[in-house]
Image (tube, rainbow, N blue to C red):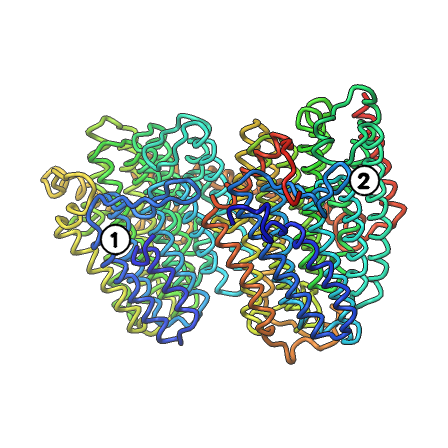
């Protein structure tokens, strides 16, 4: 693994994208539920391995610059991989793999078997798009992959069981398209102002002196577009319905990855491309992002407290957690960025595990209406324990991953002397205790009032009969994520170092190197 | 932390407990504290283990004299409580007890603030199950109130810890002193768990609400852990002398007016804490030894009294003074144990309270803290009246209630007898206790002066109690409160006292209602916009979402173009 540039191993950046991309049409060709699931799992697994290799490589070397197809920029498209996006690639492919293992039983129960191959095709396209966004070094290419992933996401959501899923999907189509077009407009203006689409070149030419207005408009459009895609408060409204209505396995995957990738783009554009001085110095981006972040984690935590459907509760809590990430990013300091990046990873893992637990309950109980989950612990002890442990992570109890990132965030805020925000972070953590605690209290301690509660929950399967523990294929991936969460929580410095390195590279801006790859 | 460190043993046992049948669990609960004790004594004194976690040097085991004293008494008390609770079926309560005891021992062994914080929160979370195990709506609500306050203490500790870390770059848990905002936060966090005046409400609210056995367990750990934390971090802080004096005095007033005897005991527990806090505040070696010894002994005799009241509650279904009386006829052993507990708490010579209380009193006198000395003396007399005479008298002797309950079950009897025996042994032969204390003890409790003072005081208080009885001033329960501290010295005060305490209570209730009112108003307001289907929680229509996008865009462009 010493020299990536010449051998076949040097083609890993391309393999990262091509494997899932080619696997997608293969799924359509075989048209078989089981086979397409296997193909998707294999492709996702390969991507995880390649992403792991990339993480190892960029940990020791300079960022990789890989000219796709041998076409050098500015003609061709370049892949630019440093610690940040290698980490993102690993996050996306890793969670996708784990969620795919989990998905089979869950999907088999909610989608008819003749349509399942389409679901896995969409899934593969979605990870292709998400990883493409993360890997590319070309601004327009970002948009292309963004559209691929978005369209795949719309269809994943539309696979949801009830007709509401179609409405949720449609709303997301409209909002997502608006976001994407804002991003496209922004990139267009940038091209007009600088004459290049390559990020490294863009980074070198901004701020331009000839047409500062165009760059400024581009900047504003990109901000809005990315805020929509990343579901940053108050542009988050599409997210709750989408997460609620989508098939739960897809939600677990998307909650862990999709908005996170948009946050990555936000960091890549504003730090690497525009540069800290431009984004946060002359344009006061922190005056936009910081209030949005604080509003997000306070208001959305409050809303989550009152939700009775677990999926909706977790969806709003996701928006709140995105608020923490954005708060870190908006500080524009080494510590703040580190906190943001670490929380991207940690929250991805935690929220995926939580949604998986909810999916298990949904599979067995037929609903996830909180007040009707009384004494579920007796029937599904492992699922409920998983929910409890992941809930600890969400709250940020020490020894879980959530603590590492929250601690880092609080340190970063203190470093800037932002006292009131620290207080609000702690207060919203207490709210997380409340909304997680309410569920746990009902699962563990509330004695069965079974029948009438079940009726109001809209249950098909009946409440008290026949609920038993979820299948092993769903429990194992869930506990794998939990183990990872505790591992991160206990060995916090591993992820903190990785994120710290990524943050350092971001703050330095993109380094102009000679392109490697095949020449 | 190795798997054989004391707290780890408890936590592993709690895990095993999840899978054991009933008998197995009860035996395990007994065996674990013994294993814990062995583990504690297997560490060489002064061991300080350090682990690197997250770039911090955490130390899970610091086995110096102070920590060992507390770890030992916690283990002994945990074993006695387990014996007492041998009949309990409830898995939840048993697991809660194990985790609670384990984290309390973990907290006193913690060598740095982060570890302390972890165990600090763990005790809060574990102990609430001892209330929730009753599974009544009332216990649920009480438990929730208790939990909120306990977690608040943890949050304050965390805040203080971060501030302190920023100030000094150190997370070591050594002498802190109230010198900066950070240490002040930590001080308040400790103060909440130590039931400082005005921060004490949770204790009297929660302890009587536990299960019969749960209350015994509750009375052992949280507050003593806080005393340890204060002794470690704030020894010699002048303020503590005043706080402790006020605790000792105010608890005396509040203990008398309670009809529920478990509540009376909760207040008298606060009074005993006052003694320890004064000792910590004085901060000399003698005083710290006094506080440690007092903590050690009070765990035993306070636990014993709680056990006796628990037994009464177990057999008769009530622990209210007005409904009890004359139980000694059928419960002679419980009555005898209760008398031993009473003698210990009122520091009768040859009982454990005497050897520990005199340490603190002497320390106050040597260093010239006469106000504190006087306050503690008054409190001692108060203890005698509201706990030591009143409880045995009203429950086991006094006016016959007509109740004829059976004697306590065997295991409860055994637990009470062993605890009572320990109280006497320590009182008669204090040398092993003194040897355990962190500082060299060159002190003898049994001097002529000490004996005379104490006997005089006891005789005087006892005489006045009898005199009051003869005068018919003690017929109703409520009248006992006048006795409390002052009638012995000033007759005119009795009339004023109930007014004072009831007006304090009234103000406090008004304040509570105000806070609750504000909270519920806010809750309703938020619920109105955040409940499912309300504006913030529903799926917005495309038009609404677009409108928000446009507004944000406008703000952004305006900000950027400005």
Q: Is residue A324 visible?
A: no
State whether discs 2 and 1 lie on one chain: no
Q: Quadrant of the C terminus of chain B?
A: top right
Mark 2 lies on a secondary structure that is helix
Q: What mark, if any, has residue B517 been given in the picture?
A: none
Is A361 drawn above or below residue B233 in the view shown? Answer: below
Chain to which the residue tagged by mark 1 belongs: B
Residue B330 placed where, x, y %? 30, 72
Q: Which mark is residue B72?
A: 1
Task: Count residues near mark 2 (Cα–Cα under 10 Å), then give few for <14, some for 14-19, many for 20+.
Answer: many
Q: Is residue A68 left or right of residue B322?
A: right
Disc 2 to disc 1, how far (Cα)? 66 Å
Confirm whether residue B144 shows in the render: yes
Q: Chain of mark 2?
A: A
Q: Which mark is residue A183?
A: 2
Q: Is residue A246 above or below residue A330?
A: below
Residue B407 at x, y percent in the picture: 31, 72
Q: Name above or below for residue A14 compared with residue A140.
A: below
């Amino acid at each position: 693994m010493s020299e990536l540039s010449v051998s076949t191993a040097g083609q890993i950046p391309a393999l990262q994208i091509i494997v899932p991309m080619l696997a997608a049409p293969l799924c359509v060709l075989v048209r078989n539920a089981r086979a397409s699931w296997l193909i998707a799992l294999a492709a996702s697994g390969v991507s995880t391995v390649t992403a792991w290799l990339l993480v190892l490589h960029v940990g020791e070397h300079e960022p990789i610059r890989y000219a796709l197809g041998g076409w050098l920029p500015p003609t061709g498209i370049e892949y630019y991989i440093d610690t940040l996006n290698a980490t993102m690639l690993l996050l996306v492919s890793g969670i996708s793999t784990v969620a795919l293992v989990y998905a089979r039983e869950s999907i088999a129960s909610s989608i008819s078997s003749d349509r399942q191959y389409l679901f896995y095709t969409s899934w593969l396209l979605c990870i292709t798009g998400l990883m493409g966004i993360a890997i590319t070094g070309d601004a327009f290419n970002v948009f292309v992959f963004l559209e691929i992933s978005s369209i795949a996401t719309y269809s994943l959501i539309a696979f949801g069981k009830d007709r509401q899923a179609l409405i949720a999907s449609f709303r997301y189509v409209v909002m997502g398209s608006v976001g994407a077009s804002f991003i496209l407009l922004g990139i267009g203006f940038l091209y007009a102002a600088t004459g290049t689409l390559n990020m490294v070149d863009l980074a070198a030419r901004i701020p331009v002196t000839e047409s500062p207005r165009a760059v400024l408009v581009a900047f504003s459009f990109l901000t809005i577009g990315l805020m929509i895609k990343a579901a940053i408060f108050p542009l988050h409204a599409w997210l709750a319905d989408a997460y609620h209505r989508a098939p739960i396995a897809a939600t677990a995957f998307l909650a862990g990855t999709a908005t996170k990738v948009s946050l990555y783009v936000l960091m890549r554009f504003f730090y690497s491309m525009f540069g800290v001085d431009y984004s946060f110095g002359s344009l006061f981006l922190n005056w936009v992002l910081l209030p949005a972040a604080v509003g997000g984690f306070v208001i959305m935590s409050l809303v989550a407290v009152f939700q009775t459907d677990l999926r909706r509760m977790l969806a709003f809590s996701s928006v709140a957690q995105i608020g923490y990430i954005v708060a870190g990013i908006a500080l524009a300091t080494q510590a703040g960025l580190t906190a943001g990046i670490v929380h991207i990873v940690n929250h991805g893992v935690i929220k995926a595990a939580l949604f998986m637990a909810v999916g298990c309950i949904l599979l067995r109980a037929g609903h996830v209406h909180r007040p009707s989950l009384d004494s579920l612990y007796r029937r599904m002890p492992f699922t409920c324990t998983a929910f409890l442990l992941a809930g600890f992570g969400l709250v940020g109890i020490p020894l879980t991953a959530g603590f590492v990132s929250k601690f880092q965030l609080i340190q970063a805020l203190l470093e800037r002397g932002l006292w009131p925000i620290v207080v609000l972070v702690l207060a919203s953590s207490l709210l997380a205790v409340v909304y997680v605690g309410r569920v746990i209290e009902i699962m563990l301690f509330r004695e069965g009032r079974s029948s009438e509660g079940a009726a109001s929950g809209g249950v098909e399967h009946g409440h008290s009969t026949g609920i038993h523990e979820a299948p092993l294929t769903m429990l194992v991936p869930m506990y794998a994520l939990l183990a990872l969460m505790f591992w991160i929580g206990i060995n916090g410095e591993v992820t903190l170092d990785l994120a710290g390195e990524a943050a350092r590279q971001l703050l330095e801006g993109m380094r102009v190197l000679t392109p490697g790859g095949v020449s | 932390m190795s798997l054989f460190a004391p707290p780890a043993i408890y936590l592993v046992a709690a895990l095993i407990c999840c899978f054991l049948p009933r008998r197995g669990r009860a035996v395990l609960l007994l065996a674990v504290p013994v294993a814990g004790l062995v583990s504690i004594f297997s560490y060489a004194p002064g061991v300080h283990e350090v682990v690197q976690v997250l770039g911090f040097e955490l130390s899970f085991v610091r086995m110096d004299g102070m920590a060992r004293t507390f770890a030992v008494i916690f283990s002994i008390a945990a074993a006695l409580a387990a014996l007492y609770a041998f009949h309990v079926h409830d898995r939840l309560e048993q697991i809660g007890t194990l985790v609670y005891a384990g984290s309390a021992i973990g907290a006193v062994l913690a060598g740095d603030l982060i570890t302390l914080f972890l165990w600090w929160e763990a005790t809060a979370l574990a102990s609430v199950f001892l209330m929730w195990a009753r599974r009544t709506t009332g216990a649920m609500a009480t438990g929730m109130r208790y939990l909120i306050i306990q977690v608040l203490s943890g949050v304050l500790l965390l805040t203080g810890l971060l501030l302190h870390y920023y100030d000094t770059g150190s997370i070591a848990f050594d002498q802190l002193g109230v010198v900066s905002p950070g240490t002040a936060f930590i001080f308040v966090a400790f103060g909440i768990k130590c039931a400082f005046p005005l921060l004490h409400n949770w204790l009297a609210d929660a302890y009587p609400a536990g299960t019969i056995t749960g209350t015994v367990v509750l009375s052992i750990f949280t507050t003593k852990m806080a005393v340890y934390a204060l002794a470690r971090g704030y020894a010699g802080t002048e303020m503590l002398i005043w706080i402790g004096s006020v605790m000792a005095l105010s608890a005396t007033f509040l203990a008398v007016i309670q009809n529920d005897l478990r509540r009376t005991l909760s207040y008298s527990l606060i009074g005993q804490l006052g003694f320890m806090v004064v000792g910590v505040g004085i901060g000399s070696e003698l005083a710290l030894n006094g506080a440690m010894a007092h903590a050690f002994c009070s765990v035993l005799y306070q636990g014993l009294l709680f056990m006796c009241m628990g037994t009464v509650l177990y057999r008769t279904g009530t622990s209210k003074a007005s409904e009890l009386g004359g139980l000694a006829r059928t419960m002679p052993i419980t009555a005898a144990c209760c008398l031993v507990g009473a003698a210990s708490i009122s520091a009768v010579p040859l009982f454990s309270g005497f050897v520990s209380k005199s340490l603190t009193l002497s320390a106050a006198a040597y260093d010239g803290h006469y106000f504190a000395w006087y306050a503690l003396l008054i409190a001692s007399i108060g203890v005698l009246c509201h706990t030591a005479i009143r409880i045995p008298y009203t429950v086991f002797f006094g006016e016959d209630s007509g109740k004829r309950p059976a004697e306590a079950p065997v295991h409860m009897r055994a637990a009470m007898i062993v605890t009572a025996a320990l109280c006497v042994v320590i009182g008669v032969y204090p040398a092993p206790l003194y040897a355990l204390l962190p500082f060299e003890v060159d002190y003898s409790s049994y001097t002529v002066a000490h004996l005379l003072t104490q006997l005089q005081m006891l005789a005087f208080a006892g005489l006045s109690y009898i005199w009051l009885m003869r005068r018919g001033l003690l017929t109703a329960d409520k009248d006992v409160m006048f006795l409390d501290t002052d009638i012995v010295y000033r007759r005119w005060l009795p009339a004023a006292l109930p007014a004072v305490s009831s007006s304090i209570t009234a103000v406090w209730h008004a304040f509570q209602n105000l806070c609750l009112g504000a909270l519920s108003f806010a809750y309703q307001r938020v619920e109105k916009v955040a409940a499912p289907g309300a504006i913030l929680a529903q799926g917005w229509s495309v038009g609404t979402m677009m409108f928000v996008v446009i507004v944000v865009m406008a703000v952004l462009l305006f900000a950027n173009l400005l």
